[in-house]
Image: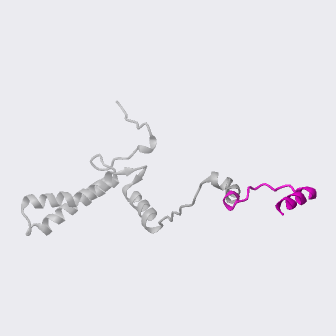
Amino acid sequence: MEVKINREIRNYTESMFFGLSMRQFIFSVLACGVAVGLYFILRPYFGVETLSWMCILGAAPFALLGFITYHGMTAEQFIWAWLRSEMLEPKELKFEDSNYYYAALKGTIDELQSGSSGRKRKKQPKYLSKRKEEKHD
């Protein structure tokens, strides 16, 4: 006697009907119901081949919803999470400048552009300033 055990316990699903979980079984029945409904509604308007393709395409989304999981979420949970993130609570992205080098040197750059060197000049002794005035006269 051999008993199958999943390596990851969270991946365990109990099979209820025909080896399917309850969720998979419900969506499979729903897909069959949609296919049968489409057949009887569209039978007067289309041929057999076109009608069979329409039934397959109509039932496929319902069948897939029962078997798809994404990041541990069922299809309905994923659709709800996507709708919330993209439609109901859209994020507002704002671009802000992030040039840290410019921010660090902003004072120095502004002084260079305005013409001052940023250094304080030492006052010249009075006798030197008088000589310069005499030379200019």
Which quadrant of the view contains residue 48? bottom left
Left or right: residue 99 compared with residue 78: right
Which quadrant of the view contains residue 33? bottom left
- In front of the other: 76 or 92: 92
- In front of the other: 78 or 120: 120
Left or right: residue 47 compared with residue 133: left
- Residue at left offset 49%, top offset 64%: 91
Q: Is the C terminus in the top left, top right, bottom left or bottom right quadrant?
A: bottom right
- In front of the other: 42 or 20: 42
Left or right: residue 56 compared with residue 79: left
Q: Magenta region: which residues?
A: 111-137
- Residue 70 in magenta stretch: no
Which residue is most to the top?
Answer: 1
Residue 96 placed where, x, y %? 57, 60
- In front of the other: 60 or 124: 124
Residue 133 placed where, x, y %? 86, 61
Q: Is the N terminus in the top left, top right, bottom left or bottom right quadrant?
A: top left
Residue 61 placed where, x, y %? 27, 58
- Residue at left offset 42%, top offset 67%: 87
- Residue 125 in magenta stretch: yes
- Residue at left offset 30%, top offset 48%: 20
Which quadrant of the view contains residue 97? bottom right
Picture layout, residue 21 above or below residue 90? above
